Amino acid sequence: MFATAIVAVLLAAASSAFPHAAREASKDDANVSVQLSAVGNTMVKAVVTNRGDEAISVLRLNSVLDSFPCRRVDVYKEGKKMEFEGLLAHHDMQNLPDDVFATLNPGDFAENTFDIAETVDLSAGGPVTVLSEGVFLLARSDSTSISGMVQYRSNELKIDVDGVLAAKVESAGGLRRRNLDKRTSFYLDTCTPAAMKNLTALLRSTTDYADAGARAATNGSLATFETFFKKTDLRTRRPVASRFRAISNETSIIDGGIVRLTCSDDFCKGTINAIADSWISFITICPRFFSAYPPTSPECHATDQTSILLHEMTHMRHVYSPGTNDFAYGYDNVTKLPADQAINNADTFAIYAAVPYPGSYISTDSYRGC
C-alpha cells in the first residue's frame, strides 16, 4: 500500500526454472537477503537479514516471517506450483502493534521456522523446490505506519519429502475446517441476526462494486486502469473484467452459490478483519470487521466493509481461477506493483472497484473524489 522502498531483496538468478523469472535488480538489491534452509522433513527456516547501513522495520504479516499459515512460500513439484491449502488473512493496516514488525539494525536478522505441510499437501512425497517471493511492507524504525514496500525473492530450496511423515502433519486449514459447519448454506449459524442483516446488505453493495469494476475495466478510463494494472491491452483488461463479473454473479445470489460465510473463527485475533479459505470457498468475517469500518465510505482510497468483502471474494479460486494473492495493501502500494503482481493482487481489485456509486469513474480520470 505505500511509498518509496528503502531497501530491496537479494534476487535469485534470472535462470530460475520457475515461471516468474527474477526481476531486474536495483542498486539496493543486496540490502536485504532472504535465505531458506531445511531443518526437518517439511520444516523450513527463513532468515531475513538487513545487509544495508540503515535500520529498517519489516512487517511480518503475510510474509515469510508470519506465524499465521499464510502463503509464506510456494512449493513446486516437477516444475509445477502445488496448490496452496492455507489461509489468507485481511489485516487492519492502519493500527498495527509493535510486535508485528521485525526491526533490524544493520547486520541484524529475523527468522521464522514453519512446516510447509501446513499449507501444501505433501503426502505423495518426493523431491520439491521451495521458493518465497513477494513483497515486504516497511515502516520507519521508529514507527508502525507503513511507509514503503520492497520486492523479495529467496533462494530455491530443494527438499526430498518423506510422504508418510508429511501426511501426519495436519494442515492449518484442515484443523480449522473440522470446526466449521459443513452445510451448503451461504450463511452459517455463527452469524448473529444483526450480522446476517449487515452481510446481506454488504453482498448487494459488493455486487455494485464488482459491476462498477467490470464496466470500468471494459469501457472506462485507460489512464485509471493503467494506474492500477500497469497495462491497458485487452489481454489484461479482459481477465480483470471477467473476475469482477464472476464475483458479481456470486454475490448477487445472496443465499446460495459457491462461497460460504461464517462469523466465528479461532483465527480471528489481533488485527485480522477477515480470513479467506479458498480451498473450500469459505470466508470468515471477524468481529472487528463490523466495528472498525463503515459499510461504505466516500473517502479517497478508503477501506470499508464492502471493499474488504470484495477483496476476500477475489481470493476465491472456485469463483474465478486463479484466486488472488496478498502482495500489497492500500492505494500507495498496490499502484507500485508490477503488472504480473497487480493482476493477481486482491487489494488492487478492491480499491479499483471501491467507488461511491457504480460507474462513477467510467468516463473520467477522477477516482473516488481524489
Image (tube, rainbow, N blue to C red):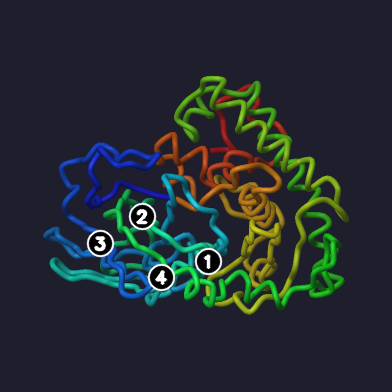
Of the numbered discs 2 and 1, the one sitting upstream in the chain is: 1
Of the numbered discs 3 and 2, the one sitting upstream in the chain is: 3
C-alpha gap between disc 1 and disc 4: 11 Å
**In front: 324, or 214?**
324
Name which residue type carries label 4. Thr
- Residue under label 3: 35
Residue 302 x %, y %: 57, 51
- Residue under label 4: 42
Name which residue type carries label 3. Gln
Q: Secondary structure at mark 3?
A: strand
Of the numbered discs 3 and 1, the one sitting upstream in the chain is: 3
Q: Secondary structure at mark 4?
A: loop
- Residue under label 2: 131
- Residue under label 1: 123
Q: Residues within 10 Å of mark 2 (few under 14, many from 20)?
A: some
* Residue in view at x 62 percent, y 64 percent: 275
Q: From the viewer's perspective, tell me whether residue 261 is left or right of residue 367.
A: right
C-alpha gap between disc 3 and disc 1: 25 Å
* Residue in view at x 11 percent, y 60 percent: 53
Residue 6 x %, y %: 24, 52
Query: Which label sits in the foreground, 3 or 4?
Result: 4
**In front: 31, or 292?**
31
C-alpha gap between disc 4 and disc 2: 13 Å
C-alpha gap between disc 3 and disc 2: 10 Å
The reply to whether callout 1 and callout 4 are in contact (CB within 8 Å) is no
